[in-house]
Amino acid sequence: MEKKETVAIIGGGLSGSLLACCLAKRGFKVSLYERRGDFRETGYLGGRSINLALSERGINALKKVNLADSVLDDAIAMNGRVMHSVAGELSYQPYGKAGQYINSVSRSGLNLKLIELADEFENVTLYFNYKCIDADLKNNTAIFETAEGEKVSVKADIMLGTDGAFSAIRSEMQHTERFNFSQQYENYGYKELEIVPGPDNKFMLEEHALHIWPRGEFMMIALPNPGGNFTCTLFMPYTGVNGLDKLKTEDDVKVFFNKYFADALPLMPGYIHDFFNNPTGSLLTVRCSPWVRGRFALVGDAAHAVVPFYGQGMNCSFEDVAVLDELIDKHYPDWDKVLSEYQDARIDNANAIADLALKNFVEMRDLVGHKDFLEFKHIEHDLCDLYPDKFKSQYELTTFTNMPYRYAWNQGFKNEQLIKAIISEGLKEKLEDRELMNKMFEKYL
């Protein structure tokens, strides 16, 4: 049914284009403004990681616009992570129980699908090369600059900022009273590299896994692509003994990779070219509150940019869209209630996934190779298998359910206390003793 309100969405990335589809489906007249050119014609120039991990929260949101099946058809399932030691030895950690996996998807491919779907709605108008440079929060107006340098003023009943970690809408909100904002850069940068396919586009590593080369202070990861190649990302400190600043020449890079990633080198013929020609990305966490000012609201990275180490950045942003969509269904036409409940539902959960992502960075680059950590994960996995109704790992709650992120954070702490007690009390061989374990669950969970 057609709605009377007009909605302007500032930012045509993943969350903005999904949001446009959801609102168009509800009958709103939607205008979507994107600072880049139409990437259906120009190609995708995202400048960011070209692979993303799609899991339950994101899939749930895509189902709202009937796009989940199409996206998953193009995805590669990853059932767990394969760790590569310096000596080239491999070890495997499943992500969850049998049948639980995350999906490697193309950022550009997904964004294109969403833009194409949005364009199919008669009540959606797409504007490309419209860079938001200012906003008037009191008068529901945003100011854009076009590719020709023209200034354009846009007014709508509802203004939704999906313009990313460096949001112009959020920047304007920062000038308002009692607006809380923090941005924290890690002392880490990243480089995109590539593991090429073998003959006939054969995968040269296990295709249904995320590969990790954990090296303590730094690490490399690789995600599979449908073409048989892997997108690799090298995460390193900017400075220090193993800092990016130490890799200045081709010889520096050759020595470094031969020392730490020798098993991957034969599969990466272009690693030196990629290292010096691909940009160095930065790692940023953004937190703010409130997310709503009048009829303006922040969605996705504009409200909560997170580091990529839990694979939840896109999923969290898509969950914002799903929650907003559900609240419109529940409270429309009371927009005050919709937007108020939206930020109440999301701010603390966004802070929780930001903390989880930072915590997981330490785990991925360092702990995954430690004996104590592997023992912990082994017990955790056994408890998940033996007591699926009573015990769920923090990773399972975060990745394979729609439970609040804050709940997953809190439950993870309880799980940690439980498993530490099992180890310290010498109960590792008694995990199948249901009476004993039920007592432990009651005590710690």
Image: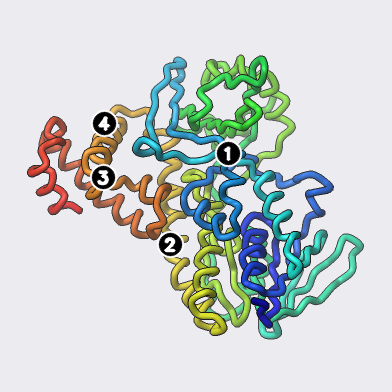
Tell me residue 165's x, y (percent).
Answer: 62, 58
Q: Amino acid at mark 3?
A: Pro
Work out whether mark 2 precedes mark 4 in sequence or the reverse, and give the earlier one: 2
Residue labelled with disc 1: 75
**Residue drawn at (50%, 50%), measured in percent from left and top?**
312
Work out whether mark 2 precedes mark 1 in sequence or the reverse, and give the earlier one: 1
Q: Amino acid at mark 2?
A: Asn
Left or right: 120 with respect to 350? right
Distance between mark 3 and mark 2 Cα atoms: 24 Å
Distance between mark 4 and mark 3 Cα atoms: 19 Å
Residue labelled with disc 4: 375
**Relative vertical location of residue 109 with respect to residue 127 in this rendering, above or below:** above
Residue labelled with disc 3: 388
**Mark 2: few, some, or many residues within 10 Å (few <14, many ≥20)?**
many
**Relative vertical location of residue 166 with respect to residue 95 in this rendering, above or below:** below
**Residue drawn at (26%, 38%), measured in percent from left and top?**
385
Distance between mark 4 and mark 1 Cα atoms: 32 Å
The secondary structure type at the circle numbered 4 is helix
- Residue 349 badge: 2
